[in-house]
Amino acid sequence: MIFNLGGVGGTMDAPGFTASLVAGGVAGISVDLILFPLDTIKTRLQSPQGFNKAGGFRGIYAGVPSAAVGSFPNAAAFFLTYEYVKSLLHTDSTSHFRPVKHMLAASTGEVVACLIRVPSEVVKQRAQVSASSKTLQIFLTILSEEGIQGLYRGYKSTVLREIPFSLVQFPLWESLKALWAWRRGHVVDSWQSAVCGAFAGGFAAAVTTPLDVAKTRIMLAKAGSSTAVGNVLSAMHGVWRSQGLAGLFAGVLPRMAAISMGGFIFLGAYDQTRSLLLELGRKSP
């Protein structure tokens, strides 16, 4: 997914939870489809064969069916886990441990959501660097050559990317909101929170780019190769040895742009969809 879902939601009743679940899924699909070209550019910049050989700017929507299919259940799995863990770790609203609770809930949510996200991501990224191949054809090839475990190649590297991302993003997001509130003398509005989230997400995206590069290399590696084993440090070392620092930060700009803009689009689509569903719920007998 092109954005980070953490920080949304709270203690809620059943109708509110259902609305949040559906709204999160709708918002997730919206972001993934709108910003898909940026994700394709990022993947091709990070691919071992290089941007031009991976397709350049051609077939920029290659792999979009995989993203579309996986986006809703991925967001739903995150929300279910996120809200459940938050309810288990109930703390007072003024507690200093509140950000820690959000980080733990978001990290657990990412671990569960990756069970859905990784197969979708593997198929999507391989389609992005071989635009001439159909998504279904790539999916069936992975199953026949590598089995189910082929679809989960890069699971560990994806989780190792998402958790540090959350650990960087959430404290920074909370600090920026607190600073803005202190400067303005009042609690930040939702759009101001979104601005803080965009900056926090963009920064977190930048510093975790080497982990994202390693994940991409692992998912795109040929079956049986040393990179395909899934060792993140080994993959990063290989990139450093062949391309240096520039290789480890390949695709950093489109990654930052996608995650920053994704936060804005997600929050807008999430709020609109959730409000509509709650309004419809109140009107129904």
Image (cartoon, rainbow, N blue to C red):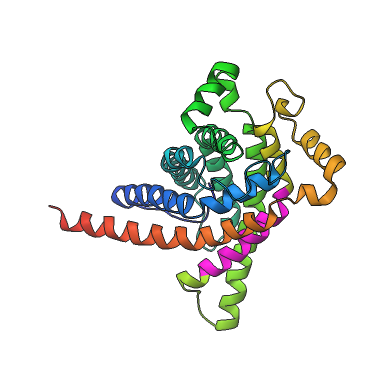
Side of 42 relative to 6 (left or right): right
Q: Residue furthest right?
A: 241
Q: Nearer the viewer, residue 127 or 4?
A: 127
Q: Is residue 3 visible?
A: no
**What x and y, as percent, mark residue 162?**
62, 45
| Residue beneath the point at 40% across and 47% down | 25
Q: Is residue 178 magenta?
A: no
Task: Look at the picture and state if 219 lies above or below 78.
Answer: above
Side of 230 relative to 72 (left or right): right
| Residue beneath the point at 39% across and 59% down | 269
Q: Nearer the viewer, residue 276 or 85?
A: 276
Q: Quadrant of residue 44?
A: top right
- How many numbered marks appear? 0
Task: Look at the picture and state if 229 lies above or below 247.
Answer: above
**What x and y, as percent, mark residue 225?**
74, 24
Q: Is residue 203 magenta?
A: yes
**What x and y, as percent, mark residue 68?**
43, 42
Task: Look at the picture and state if 62 lies above or below 175.
Answer: above
**What x and y, as percent, mark residue 92?**
50, 58
Magenta residues (range): 193-209
